[in-house]
């Protein structure tokens, strides 16, 4: 009975994590698409300063992580010093900014698909630079993802969807997404290096350090440079409170979502988190298609199925590998 109760609690906790991640990031995606396509106020102005979202997100997550450290920290030390995150902070500032900027040029479903192909540059770099050999199933996964994204990019987007974009330009939009992936790869590698050097570093320390540097860089970019648009973004929010509210909710969704991700990884492992976030991306595309009134064509849905079929197969391969490792440990 005790084991059954423990199992039930794990199922309920996992369900809670799934609901939290899906709700936070799907709603954040809706807000992101709204801010990039909607015309606010009687004057029908667009919010053109999308880079401002990164600054707002950094500030909210910085405050959030500081509060969490004060509430839950055991008072221990040995974590990575705040200054060690400066280089990862640069790429983590530029990368997401490119991903958000891409929404001026391509639709939200296209952006989600492009950003789902992170495995492609990882495998290319691993094979070309480090000489890593991958299995045939792993190449099959990459083929499905690359083929799905490429086919989706080549298919004609509906005129209704294009009319909502600020500056339609598919090559530039996809280019920004893939640069985003490249910068994300460097960010992740640097974070892994930091945690390897400072094993006592926890998730809140990383969140605090990354967002501290992100806030510094974005403040300089938005308010310190001659062409910075920080003051224009603030003025737009004053004139259009609805946009300011959407930005605040967007940032809170990101902070809450990170909490659920950390909880999932700590209790169920990174594989479970990958599965949840991958399925969330698929649901985000469905929700975007329904709410925006711009349904995808049958060919586009075929491309979406290819991408998520490849990602699902990749998750299955990881699960099998994890099972084999656990069996070896037992024997």
Image (cartoon, rainbow, N blue to C red):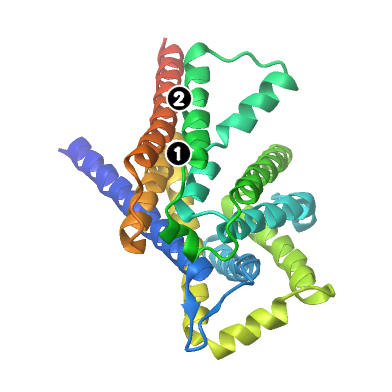
Drawn side of residue 288 relative to residue 182, left or right: left
- x 66%, y 16%: residue: 132
Residue 97: x %, y % from top left: 65, 58
- x 48%, y 34%: residue: 151
Drawn side of residue 35 relative to residue 298, left or right: right
If the image is split into quadrants, where does the C terminus sit? top left
Task: Provide the secondary structure element on which disc 1 rests.
Answer: helix
Return the disc, 1 or 2, that comes first in the chain's sequence: 1
Q: Is residue 82 visible?
A: yes
Q: Compare residues 164 and 14 and report the one nearer the observer.
A: 164
- x 45%, y 50%: residue: 157
Q: Compare residues 310 and 130 and report the one nearer the observer.
A: 310
Q: Compare residues 248 and 139 and report the one nearer the observer.
A: 139
Could you classify mark 2 by the number of other residues whose Cα lies within 10 Å: few (under 14), some (14-19), or many (20 or more)? Answer: few
Task: Find the distance from the CA under tag 1 to the CA under tag 2.
Answer: 10 Å
Q: Are marks 1 and 2 in contact (CB under 8 Å)?
A: yes
In the picture as drawn, the residue positioned furthest to the top comes out as: 331
- x 35%, y 55%: residue: 289
Task: Provide the secondary structure element on which disc 2 rests.
Answer: helix
Q: Compare residues 310 and 304 and report the one nearer the observer.
A: 304
In the picture as drawn, the residue positioned furthest to the right comes out as: 226
Q: Is residue 289 above or below residue 266?
A: below
Residue 143: x %, y % from top left: 51, 23
Residue 82: x %, y % from top left: 75, 57
Location of mark 2 (residue): 318
Location of mark 1 (residue): 274
Mark sitting on residue 67: none
Residue 274: x %, y % from top left: 45, 39
């Amino acid at each position: 009975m005790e084991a059954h109760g423990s199992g039930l609690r794990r199922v309920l906790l996992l369900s809670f994590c799934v609901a939290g991640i899906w709700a936070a990031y799907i709603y954040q995606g809706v807000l992101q698409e709204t801010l990039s396509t909607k015309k606010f106020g009687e004057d029908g102005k667009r919010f053109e300063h999308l880079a401002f979202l990164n600054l707002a997100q950094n500030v909210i997550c910085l405050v959030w992580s500081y509060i969490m450290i004060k509430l839950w920290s055991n008072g221990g030390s040995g974590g990575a010093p705040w200054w060690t995150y400066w280089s990862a902070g640069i790429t983590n500032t530029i990368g997401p900014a490119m991903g958000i900027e891409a929404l001026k040029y391509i639709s939200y479903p296209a952006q989600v698909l492009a950003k789902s192909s992170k495995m492609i540059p990882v495998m290319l770099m691993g094979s070309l630079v480090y000489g890593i050999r991958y299995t045939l199933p792993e190449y099959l996964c990459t083929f499905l993802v690359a083929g799905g994204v490429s086919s989706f990019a080549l298919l004609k987007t509906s005129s209704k969807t294009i009319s909502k974009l600020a500056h339609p330009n598919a090559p530039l939009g996809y280019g920004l997404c893939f640069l985003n992936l490249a910068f994300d790869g460097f960010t992740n590698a640097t974070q892994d290096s930091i945690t390897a050097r400072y094993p006592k570093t926890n998730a809140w320390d990383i969140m605090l350090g990354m967002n501290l540097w992100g806030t510094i860089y974005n403040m300089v970019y938005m308010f310190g440079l001659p062409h910075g648009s920080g003051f224009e973004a603030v003025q737009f929010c004053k004139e259009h409170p609805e946009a300011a509210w959407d930005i605040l909710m967007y940032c809170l969704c990101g902070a809450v979502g990170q909490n659920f991700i950390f909880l999932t990884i700590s209790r169920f492992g990174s594989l479970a988190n990958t599965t949840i976030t991958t399925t969330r991306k698929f649901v985000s595309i469905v929700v975007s298609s329904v709410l925006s009134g711009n349904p995808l064509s049958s060919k586009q849905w075929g491309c979406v199925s290819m991408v998520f079929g490849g990602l699902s197969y990749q998750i299955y391969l990881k699960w099998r590998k994890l099972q084999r490792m656990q069996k070896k440990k037992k024997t």
